[in-house]
Amino acid sequence: MPLQVFQSRWAMIGLPRHASGPWSPTEQLDQIAGAGFDGVSISFHDPENAVLLSREAVERGLGIEVVCYPADAAEFDALLRVLEPVPGVSHITMQPMLRTPHIDVAAKAIRQWYASARQAGTPLLIETHRGRLTSDILFTTELLDAVPELRLTADLSHYVNGDEFALPVSERNQALIERLLARSDVFHGRIASPGQVQVPVRAEHTRPLLELFTSWWRRGFELRRAEDPEPLVTFTAELGPPGDWYAGLGPDGNEHTDRWVEALDLANLARSLWA
């Protein structure tokens, strides 16, 4: 199975750069399809609008990455009922809003979510993300031991930033990342520094960071192929907008970079790493 490369619809907020107005949701999908992406990542914060947007995306030949934020089994089951008539769903990426210091509590919740996803017939991935169940990298690796069926959407920017990874990355941190990569089927594309969750993809001062993330994505792809000769792997370009404190702004209020150009760059980079 070839690599699927998706673009985040959240990452389209405020685009295009330096335009008189942003693209409408329909125009966003047109741009994503026209640029050759295989699918779009859609947040289901607002299920009704997300379903309508998903249908429009499928009409353009795009697959759907569903991003959801349940805190318990009931919330996830409600989402699955919403998704029943939605075509083109590739997988669900969950950012669990459950917060607990107890591995047994977290593991029980994850098992319940996976049981529901199996019954629905939809692949489920748990995203590595700050402020969520997986906020702490050590806790997350313990969850991998506690729940053997757990598979990840690896957004490693949250650990580089959240744990303030120093460069060069320590042997301890590299070993932890390796454990995550070995259980990852989906990768969210963003470059982070110890002090910022999102930095320019191509800049002289961020070159070591791009090399670091590139090495991790390449390794993740290698591990999936070693595990399965025909893996299903998705890479989603996910460069967040300034309104959510992701994209950096200059004193003039303009973004430092063109996120759409960077998204296309990340898509090409992922394809080259896969090849």
Image (cartoon, rainbow, N blue to C red):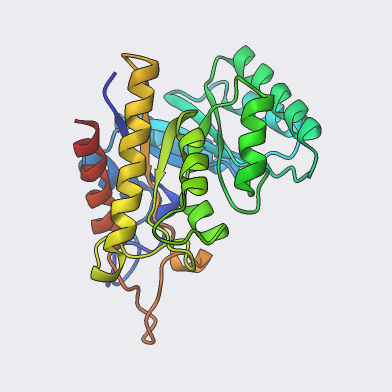
Depth check: 61 or 209 in front?
209
- The N terminus, quarter of image: top left
Instruction: Give the x, y percent position of residue 156.
Output: 47, 47
Residue 70 visible, this angle: yes
Instruction: Give the x, y percent position of residue 256.
Output: 32, 73
Q: Residue furthest front?
A: 171
- The C terminus, quarter of image: top left
Q: Residue at x 39, y 87 (%)?
A: 251
Depth check: 235 or 142 in front?
142
Q: Residue at x 49, y 58 (%)?
A: 165
Q: Residue furthest bottom?
A: 251
Q: Residue at x 30, y 55 (%)?
A: 210
Quadrant for residue 19, please give it.
bottom left
Quadrant for residue 253, please give it.
bottom left
Residue 6 visible, this angle: no
Instruction: Give the x, y percent position of residue 159.
Output: 53, 52
Q: Along the horizontal axis of the image, is 10 left or right of 207? A: right
Q: Along the horizontal axis of the image, is 130 left or right of 173? A: right
Quadrant for residue 12, please give it.
bottom left
Instruction: Give the x, y percent position of residue 98.
Output: 74, 42
Q: Residue at x 45, y 34 (%)?
A: 181
Q: Along the horizontal axis of the image, is 178 left or right of 258? A: right
Looking at the image, residue 272 lies above or below residue 224: below
